[in-house]
Image: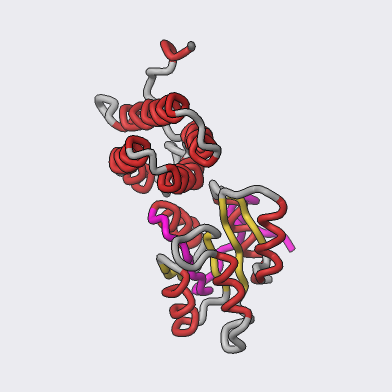
Amino acid sequence: MADPATPSSPAKVTGVRVLIVDDDRVSRLLCRRFLELAGYQVEEATDGLAGLQRVREWAPRLIVLDALMPGMDGDEFARRLRADSAISHTRILMVSGRTEPAFIVHARVAGIDDYLTKPIQRGDLLARVQALLA
Amino acid sequence: MQNDFSAAPLASELAGDPDLADLIELFVSEMPQRLEALEEAAAAADLASLATLAHQLKGSAGGYGYPGITAAAARLEACARHRSSREDLVRATQDLRELCRRAEAALKVPGG
């Protein structure tokens, strides 16, 4: 099917819920802007515990999850989410500046669905999110 | 070194994107506080905090169109994690500070 949108801006979605869990405010702001411009409904949490709580209350379809946060890190977040049958179906896209293969393997074992290296670029982020929600 | 040529204002690679103009301005306007925190951590030889702060800046700057700041923050993070000499840490922090100052200068161009 022909898509009228440009390759860097996939077709607009409306109202699909995405939660951003990241302790870094400027990273959240940029990610939120990219997602909202594409039509997603976005909320934010600043740490893992608050993030898990928000997933239970708001039921997002996908989480953009930072890997390194004080307190609960991204791997622990993913393990706890997968262990809770009420929310375990939620898709997780991890974002991090870490690039070591072993780090990414650990995150995948913990339960993430996909991994994107920071700094995030608009086209990359939207393509990954769209693919995970397909 | 080639620092004589590196004093020019540093514009974001995304400066022409109207969807991001306000966010880029906010990101740059908050840089002084970030730098202050980095320099405090460096002065206190708090390498764990320094690595964390540098890691955050590495992760965000490129997304705002400043890959040079991401690269400089990555060098500082590596210095902190590998417990490099104090001299190396100071140099890496100064490089980062200079890039941030140039980014601020680019937003203050007269007539803008």
Would residue A85 be counted in the magenta stretch? no
Residue with the most extreme bottom position = A86
Q: Depth check: B48 or B59 in front?
A: B48
What x and y, as percent, mark residue A51?
46, 73
Q: Quadrant of the C terminus of chain A?
A: bottom right
Residue with the most extreme left position = B110
The image shows a total of numbered marks equal to 0
Q: Looking at the image, which residue is at 58% across and 54% down?
A: A9
What x and y, as percent, mark residue A2?
71, 59
| Residue B31 appears anywhere in the view | no
Q: Looking at the image, which residue is at 68% across and 57% down?
A: A104
Left of A15 or right of it: where is A128? right
Left of B85 or right of it: where is A125? right
Q: Quadrant of the N terminus of chain A?
A: bottom right
Would residue A6 be counted in the magenta stretch? yes
**Colouring chosen for the image of the structure:** secondary structure
Left of A56 or right of it: where is A123? right
Q: Depth check: B15 or A18 in front?
A: A18
On screen, residue A48 above or below B71: below
Residue with the most extreme right position = A1
What x and y, as percent, mark residue A27?
45, 53
Quarter assignment of residue A47: bottom left
| Residue A130 appears anywhere in the view | yes
On screen, residue A51 above or below A29: below
Q: Looking at the image, which residue is at 32% across and 32% down?
A: B104
On screen, residue B9 above or below B23: above
Q: Looking at the image, which residue is at 49% across and 79% down?
A: A55
What x and y, as percent, mark residue A89?
63, 81
Quarter assignment of residue A108: bottom right
Q: From the image, give the main secondary structure of the stretch colored magenta.
A: loop
What's drawn in magenta, residue-wise?
Answer: A1-25
